[in-house]
Amino acid sequence: MSLQNKIDFALIFSVKNANLNGDPLNGNRPRTDYDGFGEVSDVCIKRKIRDRLQDSGEQIFVQSDEKKTDGMPSLKVRAESAEHGLGKDAFNVKKTTPVETARLANEKWIDVRSFGQLFAFKSDNKDGISIPIRGPVSIQSAFSVEPVSITSTQITKSVSGEGDGSKKSSDTMGMKHRVDGAVYVAFGGMTPQLSERTGFNEDDANKIKQVLPKLFEGDASSARPEGSMVVEKVIWWKHNCKSGQYSSAKVHRTLAMNADGSYALDNLEGLEPEEIDGF
């Protein structure tokens, strides 16, 4: 059964001396908006949700290079794989229909039925057909509560040289950036009307709910050292109907954040928030 209750949620996390989400168009500096507030893209947050779901044993279509479990070199190869995907016939108009392909993709991969996906479908038309799947789970970019302070450090990068290793290769200079310390908030929601199209259900919603508090576990790197990013709280609002008792915007406004990570919640009649500690 598809989702029967609209859900809103907020993700509160803190960072200390880490580069949360570098911008490749800006020397990989941590992302900020024009007012200096730190930003983490919705794509980055979805990536971490996918990784944690995959860690828990779920089938994921959009796998990161570091966490590939099937050896597939691309999404196209994975989708058309007979063993790990749907098989080539699932994307041939002479063999099946786009509706059936979308149904199979939703059944197989939790990230497809959650976030949606766009598949290419072969047809007699030279341009082919696109199969858009619109997922019921939406996530906004995260923004810091206050403008962030970014520290940039010049570093020396050494790489292995050619030959027998007796000669040291020339070093190159680079830059490493970090956010000194900040608290971020991201909002998201789950729409029952769209879940009816993908088969996203209560069990899927609970799986995402369970991984949100441990979003940064197993995600360490030189840019994000172990323990530098922490989920402080997940606020979960479950409405009593499909359309929701209140608009998402009104629900989000009930959360008032402070720079130290503390917060206050205003009450909305009949909608009790669940406050979940980070992992």
Image (cartoon, grey):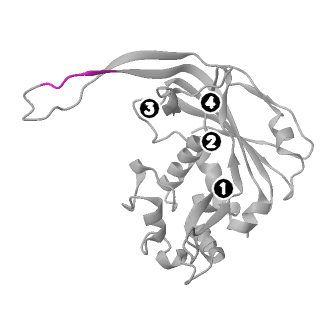
Label 4 vs label 2: CA separation?
9 Å
Q: Nearer the viewer, residue 181 or 269?
A: 181
Which quarter shows the C terminus? top right
Q: Residue at x 83, y 52 (%)?
A: 239
Q: Which residue is mark 4?
A: 39
Q: Which residue is mark 2?
A: 42
- The amino acid at mark 3 is Glu
- The amino acid at mark 4 is Glu
**Circle 3 sits in a helix, a strand or a loop, which is it?**
loop
Number of marks: 4
Which quarter shows the N terminus? bottom right
Q: Residue at x 43, y 65 (%)?
A: 77
Q: Compared to 103, does 94 lie above or below? A: below
Q: Choose the circle earlier in sequence order: 4 or 3.
A: 4
**Circle 2 sits in a helix, a strand or a loop, which is it?**
helix
Label 1 vs label 3: CA separation?
26 Å
> Which stretch did the figure color magenta?
168-173
- Residue 201, percent across and down? 70, 64
* Residue at the extreme front: 126
Determine contact: label 4, label 1, CB under 8 Å.
no
Q: Which residue is mark 3?
A: 226
Q: Choose the circle earlier in sequence order: 1 or 3.
A: 1
The residue carrying pointer 2 sits among few (fewer than 14), some (14 to 19) or many (20 or more) residues within 10 Å by Cα, namely: some
Determine contact: label 1, label 3, CB under 8 Å.
no
The residue carrying pointer 3 sits among few (fewer than 14), some (14 to 19) or many (20 or more) residues within 10 Å by Cα, namely: some
